[in-house]
Amino acid sequence: MIRREQGLTLLEFTLVVLFIGLLMWLAMTKILRLEGDVERVNVQRTVAALNSALAMEFAERVVTGRLDTAPELASGNPMDRLAQVPHNYLGPLADPIPAEIRVGHWYYDAADGLLVYRVSHGDRFESPLEGPPRARFRVEVVASERDGTPQGVRMVAVDAFEWK
């Protein structure tokens, strides 16, 4: 009686390797998509924290009878209003060159008076801005349509952008 060795043929081995490779490719695609989603959520979370800090500052001015000073909130660096700035905040920069800013970081463009986020996953982000992908924000005072009195403050995007 002849015994045949049991094992994988070259064809079976190739199919197993191809199948594992396909699974790894699918997993990496999903991970990269999730990284883009995490970045989007982190930017939204930072803007929401800034909006909350600005709202608290505005409310404090209303309560203390200093509503006339509300337009001051639109000037200066909004990150200064946070109790703790994000770990990826580089600070105010005098004349930043966007291409030289590390991706995934915030900075305050002191020359333009804008808060800027340098996007890491540019393939998941659309903006009309020339150069590297980035989102720019400013503080806006919301005024009453009737008499122009300040009603609040908020962060607004300077340029339209979209996360894909």
Image (spheres, helix red, strand yellow):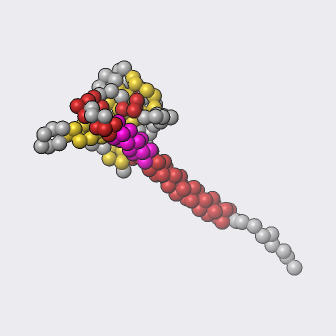
The residue at the point 35 percent across, 21 percent down is 95
Spot occupied by residue 58 in the image (x, y as percentages of width and height): 31, 37
What range is drawn magenta here? 41-57
Visible in this render: residue 151? Answer: yes
User: For the N terminus, which image quadrant?
Assistant: bottom right
Examine the image and state in which quarter residue 110 appears.
top left
Considering every residue shown, the one lying at the far right of the view is 1
Q: Residue at x 42, y 45 (%)?
A: 45
Q: Quadrant of residue 17?
A: bottom right
Is 119 situated above or below 31? above
Q: Quadrant of residue 62?
A: top left
- Magenta-drawn stretch contains 161: no
**Going by the image, does 26 lie left or right of 52?**
right
Main secondary structure type of the part rendered in magenta: helix
| In-front residue for pair 83/135 | 83
> Residue at point 36% right, 39% down?
56
Q: Residue at x 32, y 47 (%)?
A: 162
